[in-house]
Image (cartoon, helix red, strand yellow):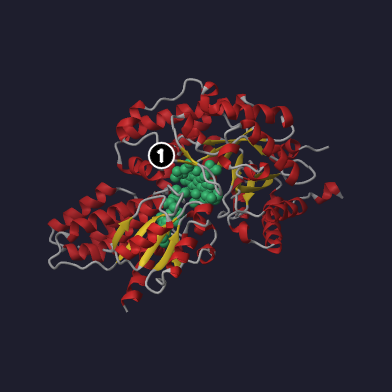
Amino acid sequence: MITSMDRLVAAIRGEPSDRIPIFCNLIDQGAIELGLEPEEYFSRGDLVAEAQLRLREKYGHDNVWSLFYVGKEAELLGCQKIKFASDGPPNVEDFVIRSWAQIPELKVPADITQHEAFTETARCLEILKREIGGKVPLCAYITSTMTLPALLMGMDRWMELLFLGPPDLTQLLLEKCHEFFVKEVAAYRAGGADVIVYSNPFGSVDFVPMSFFLERSLPWIERDIAAIGTEGVVYYCGMASLNRTIPKVLERTGIGVYYLSPMDDITQGTALVGGRGLTCGVVNDIALIDWTPEEIDHEVARMIAAGKPSGKFLFGTGVMPRAIPERNIRALMDAALRHGRHEALTA
Amino acid sequence: MLNELITKYNEALIDTDRERALNVVRAALDDGISPEAIVFEVVLPAMDRMIMSVSEGFEANVAQHFITAQISNAVTNEMLERFTAPTETRGRIVIGNSQGDLHALGKRIVIGCLRARMIEVIDLGTNVPPEKFVSAAVKHDAPIIAISSMMVHTARGPNGALKVRELLHAHGLEDRIKIIVGGAPYRFDHTLWQTVKADGWAENAVAAARLVEDMLSEVAR
Ligand code: B12
C-alpha cells in the first residue's frame, strides 16, 4: 500500500508513484464535522485531531493539520483575546503591541512547548503523530519573522512601522520575532510535524516592491531558513503570488517546496523551480464556493495538466473557506484523484 | 520644471520613500510651482499612473499603494491649505469594515486615496454592524457606502453587504445610496461583488478612488 507520505516523498524526488499528492487544507471544516461551534471546537486539541483524521478518511487527501488558527501564534506572545465567528475563522482581536513603546517589552517565551497556549496544540500533535505518524504528512503553519508583527499589531500598523518608522525599533521587533519563529518551529517539530508551511506574504512582490524584497525580505528569509534548515519547509506567501520570487529564494535558501498562489501561472512556476524542487499548484478555493461540478472538473484538469508533466508536482488548496459546500469539496477531491493518476504505473 | 518634479516625485513613490516625496514637493513650492499644480498635475496623475502600470504589467503592490495613499493624502492636505481659492469637496462617502472584520489596512489605503482626491470620508472603523452603515450614510447625507472585507464570511455572510442592501431596500433608500465593496475575497472572485448585491467594486485603492469619483459625478448629474 502506498501511503500519503510515500506519495509526497516520491513527488519531491520525482520518482514514480500511483498519483500526485493532494493537499486539501480543511481547518475550519473540523467544527462542522463534529457539529460544534468553532470556539468550543478550537478549545480542545483532541477534537481538532479527531476532526483532522475524520476529514482525511472522508475525502482521501494526503495531509493533516496541527493548525487551529493563525492567531494562536499571537496567543503564544501574549494575545488575550481571539474573536470567534460561527461562520468563519477566528481572528486576533487584542493586539499585543498597541504602541511602539511596547515593543521593547515584548517577551518571547523561554520554552514554547511549556506555554499554556501550546497545551492543546501539543495534545493535537501527539494524537496525530500516534495515529498517522510517518504515514500521512503532518503539517504545521508557521508565520515568518517578517510577517509575524502583523499578528501582534495589525498589518496597517506594521506597514507603518516598517516603511515609515524608526529602523532600530523595527529591527528590535524583527529580532524578537525571529527568536520566536525558531523556537516555534522547534516546538512543532518536536511534536511530530513533518511539513513546515513557512508563511510569508512579505516574500511576494504583490505585497512589497522587488527592491524591498531583495534588500529587506530576502535577508530575513535567509536567516529564518538558515536557523531551521530546509527539511520539510514549504515556501508560501499566504496565497499571494510567488513566481517572481522563486528563483532568488531557491538560490539563496535551497527551500525545496513552493506553494503557489492561484494567481500564479503553474507552467511558469514549475519552469522556475526547474526540477530543483516540488511545485504545488493551488486552486482558487474562494471561487470554488460557487463553481459547478463541471467547472471544478475543468479547472482541476487544467491545473494538473499544467503541472504534472514537470514530474515534481503537488495539487493543493488554500485555507479552504468554511462556505464551500461539502459537495464541492467532494467534487474537487474526486477530480484531483482522477486527473492526478500516473497512468503508466496504474495501467 | 514641472516635468522634472513629476519624475522625481514618481521615483520617490516607486521607492516607497515618504520623506523624499514630501521634500521634493516642498522644494517645488519654494521654486514657485503652485499648490494647485502640485495636486492636479503631480499627485493625482501619479495615482492614476499606478492603475495604468498594473494593466501594463509593471509591479504595483500593497506597500506601494499604502505609501502612495499616505503620501498623496499628506501632500494634498498640505497643499489645500495653500490653495488660492477655496476648493469644494467632490462628495462624501462612509466607509468601514464589515461586521466581524478587524482588518483595517485595505480600508485605510482606500481612505488615503479618496482624501487625496478631495473626497470627504467618514470612517466608521472596523467591525461595523450593517445598521450603522445605513444610519451613518443617512445622517451624513452620503450617497455611497463603502464596505471593506478581508475574509469570505465577512464579505458574503448575512451581516455584510447583503444586509446593508436589505436595509436600503426596506427603507426605500436604494436610489439615493449605492454600495461599493472591496478586499481580498473580491480579488479572488471577480463576480463576488454581484453575489453580495453591491453596485460596484474595485481591485485596489487607486481604482477604488476612481470608482467613487465616477459614481459621485453620476449622482451629481
Ligand atoms: C497578509 C495576509 C495575512 C497575514 C497578516 C494578516 C493580518 N492581520 O493582516 C497573516 C499571514 C498573519 C494572515 C493570517 C490569516 N489570514 Co490572511 N492573508 C493575507 C494576504 C496574503 C494579504 C492580505 C492583506 O493584508 N492585503 C493587503 C490589503 C491592503 O489588501 P486588501 O484588503 O485586499 O485591500 C486592497 C483592495 O482589496 C482594495 N480594497 C480594500 N477594501 C476596499 C473597500 C472598497 C469599498 C473598495 C472599492 C476597495 C477596497 O484596496 C486595498 C488597497 O489596494 C491574503 C491573501 C491575498 N493575496 O490577498 C490572505 C487572506 C486575507 N487571509 C486569509 C485567512 C483565512 C487568514 C486567517 C484567518 C487564517 C486562519 N485560519 O487563521 C488568518 C487570520 C489572522 C488574524 N488576523 O488573526 C484568507 C481570507 C479568505 C477566507 N478564507 O476567508 C486570504 C484571502 C487568503 C486565502 N486566499 O485564503 N494573513
Q: Position of residue A219 (x, y in %)?
A: 44, 35
Vertical arrangement, residue A212 with respect to residue A294, above or below: above
The residue at 66%/26% (across/down) is A126
10 Å neighbourhood of mark 1: few (<14), some, or many (≥20)?
some
Is residue B51 found left or right of A68 in the rendered image? left
Q: Secondary structure at mark 1?
A: helix
Vertical arrangement, residue B162 with respect to residue A346, above or below: below
Q: Position of residue B162 (x, y in %)?
A: 49, 62
Residue to which mark 1 is pinned: A216
Vertical arrangement, residue A72 with respect to residue A337, above or below: above
The residue at 30%/63% (across/down) is B139
Mark 1 sits near ligand 1, with its Cβ under 8 Å away: no
Is residue B221 found left or right of A238 in the rendered image? left
User: Badge 1 sits on which subunit?
Assistant: A
The residue at 33%/63% (across/down) is B93
Nearer the observer, A111 or A96? A96
Specify the quadrant that holds the N terminus of chain B: bottom left
Q: Is residue B57 visible?
A: yes
Nearer the observer, A199 or A310? A199
Nearer the observer, A86 or B74? A86
Q: Amino acid at mark 1?
A: Arg
Single out the residue that lies furthest toward the bottom.
B221
